[in-house]
Image (spheres, helix red, strand yellow):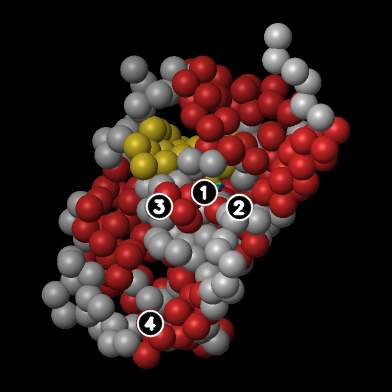
Amino acid sequence: MAAAPSEDACAMISLLGFWADAGVGYAYGEAPVDRMAEGRAKLRAPAKAPKAAPAPPPQPRAGAPAQNIAFAIETAKDFAAAATNLEELQAAIAGFEGCPLRYSGARQAVFARGEPNAPVMVIGEGPGGEEDEQGAPFVGRAGKLLDKMLAAAGLTNRVFITNTVFWRPPGNRTPTPEEQAVCMPFVERAVELVKPQLLILAGGASAKAMLRTNEGILSLRGRWSVWTSADGGLTVPALPTLHPAFLLRQPQAKKKAWQDLMSLAVKLEP
Ligand code: URA
């Protein structure tokens, strides 16, 4: 039988869990790294065109003041519209310089994972530490729980997973409505390209941004809505549910999330 961990080991595990929950996911090197300076240096470099946009418009500058947000959204719309498939969309996001989150310490753009023709699309809030490191959404603790839940509902290999923003918010804070608005044209284009039957909106920040509501997730969850694209041209039934990171903190809420997934499984065409 394995020996029980010592009191010191338990204290260390608890401390590491505390730091991880606070968004501190890495042991960095001995020397400090000024990631804000990296962002500033990139800003001084000429804007790079995404593969899909032959003649890119001038790009908004990061650290964007409020009046620049509208310009960033228009630029994002142009970039997103030029993408004819998911690979081009990923390249367009990677080349997009209008989201302030890009310059707030994120290592890379995190777009999506899963089946390009999936019947179900999961839209989370934004990448966390593991996602920022690996470049794929929902690959950390919350993602592992999400995968287990999707598997239990028979949805393995039947989902496409992305987020409302594509760069990790500093300290794993909730993305702001402005950050989400700047990324939304890319999210919408992803929905257009994947053409899912149903959307799962994981967490309050996702549900509020996608459904354009201020209602809290506890009242939204489990109630079917219809997501509509900004131009009204596309609609997809959408189910807000509890975020897996919330379920890790409040395991007693898993029953509600399970009910939500069952409602989705029933609605899903074979
Ligand atoms: N939480 C999210 O909302 N998205 C991720 O990709 C990871 C954690």
Label 3, ligand 1: CB separation under 8 Å: no
* Distance from Cα at disc 4 to Cα at disc 3: 19 Å
Question: Residue 78, percent across and down?
Answer: 28, 72
Front in this rendered view, residue 37 or 3: 3
Label 3 element class: loop
Rendered view: 252 above or below 240? above
Disc 4 residue type (three-letter): Lys
Tell me whether the residue at label 4 lies in contact with that at label 1, contact meaning CB atoms closer than 8 angstroms: no
Name the residue type under label 2: Gly
What residue appears at the point 41 percent right and 86 percent down from the top-left corner?
41
The answer to which of marks 4 and 2 sits earlier in the sequence is: 2
Q: Residue furthest bottom?
A: 44
Which quarter shows the C terminus?
A: top left
Q: CA distance from mark 4 to mark 2?
A: 24 Å
Distance between mark 1 and mark 3 Cα atoms: 8 Å
Q: Marks 4 and 1, Cα distance to the nearest angstrom?
A: 23 Å
Examine the rendering and report whether any part of residue 229 can be seen.
Answer: no
